[in-house]
Image: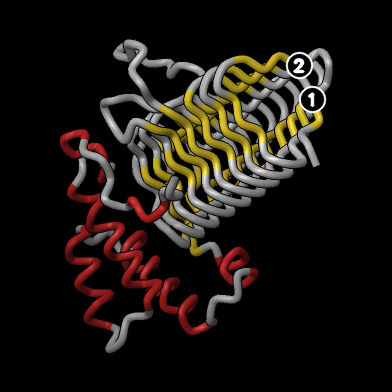
Amino acid sequence: MKPQIHPTAIIEGNVNLSDDVVVGPYCILRKNVTVGEGTVFRSHVVVEGNVKIGKENVFYPFCSIGLEPQDIKYKNEDTSVEIGDSNTFREYVTVNRGTIQDRKKTVVGDECLLMACSHIAHDSLLGNNVILANCVLLAGHVVIEDNVYISGQVCIHQFVSIGKHAFISGDTRVPWDAPPFMITQGPNPDVVCVNTVGLRRNKFQNTAIDQLKQAHKIIYTSKLPISEAIELVERKNGKLYEETNYLLNFIKRSSRGFNGRARDKGKVIASNENLVKSA
């Protein structure tokens, strides 16, 4: 089945549309755009630049995908946006392309939901099954791992990493890395507890959740220095679950970074490239 293109849509340049793609009224697709099967542009969507979009994505009105980054260092270099499969981009979502100062691309994984007015700045990387509620703002160079939920009106500082299965409460300011499996909240954010509901929904073992709760208590409520708290967690448990090991390693990296941001140390690219969907 051929793509369905509304007569008011504008298609310019090297645009490749797979079967079953729907381009609705007043959409604009320009330059080097590739779109996978079954993707739908509802109306008034702008996609421009080097943009690769996978299968079965839905873009709601007034999305802006692939335009220049809001970075004064950007001088029209050849950078891109990559989007995986089965994502939903609600009204007024913006995704800017990357810069040569980092990975040269902005990446969204699979099965993400980006609610209205959320912003994905240059060189940011979203894993799979990420939910951004309304008006979530990501600065540049942010990494969000898999299965993260970010509530409304959250602002995330550049170079911040958010660990997998984390939950960020509404109106939270995130100036440093947010650990995996935990709930983070507040204007000067606290790691308040384990994301128990989210972990149980994802069928984590109760024993693993209990060990994470113990680790949270030691690391975030004992007032011990981070290095001593980590050593105590390791000492108190003969065997660490995979989840606890992941948490401790994440915290170690963050504590060595600049102001609690592992990726901000020397402005280096994160080693966690496994989140990037291969072209």
Q: Which mark is residue 166?
A: none
Which amino acid lies under the numbered mark 1 shown in the image of this protein? Ile
- Please provide percent x and percent y for residue 249: 27, 63
Residue at mark 1: 5
What residue do we see at 39% from left, 37% from top? Answer: 142
229 and 150: which one is in front?
150
Which amino acid lies under the numbered mark 2 shown in the image of this protein? Ala
140 and 260: which one is in front?
140
Tell me: 93 left or right of 216: right
Q: Secondary structure at mark 1?
A: strand
Query: Which residue is most to the bottom?
Result: 238
What residue do we see at 40% from left, 43% from top? Answer: 143
What residue do we see at 50% from left, 56% from top? Answer: 146
Above or below for 174 versus 237: above
Location of residue 105 (image quadrant): top left
Categorize mark 2 by other alpha carbons within 10 Å: few (<14), some (14-19), many (20+): some
- Please provide percent x and percent y for residue 186: 49, 41
Query: Which residue is most to the front?
Result: 2
- Please provide percent x and percent y for residue 165: 51, 59
- Please provide percent x and percent y for residue 218: 32, 68
In the rendered view, how is the structure colored? Answer: secondary structure
What residue do we see at 46% from left, 16% from top? Answer: 68
Categorize mark 1 by other alpha carbons within 10 Å: few (<14), some (14-19), many (20+): some
Q: Secondary structure at mark 2?
A: loop
Looking at the image, do the residues carrying marks 1 and 2 touch, with CB atoms under 8 Å apart? yes
Q: What whole-number distance in Å separates the C-alpha atoms at marks 1 and 2? A: 7 Å
Residue at mark 2: 9
Above or below for 11 versus 271: above
Tell me: 62 left or right of 225: right
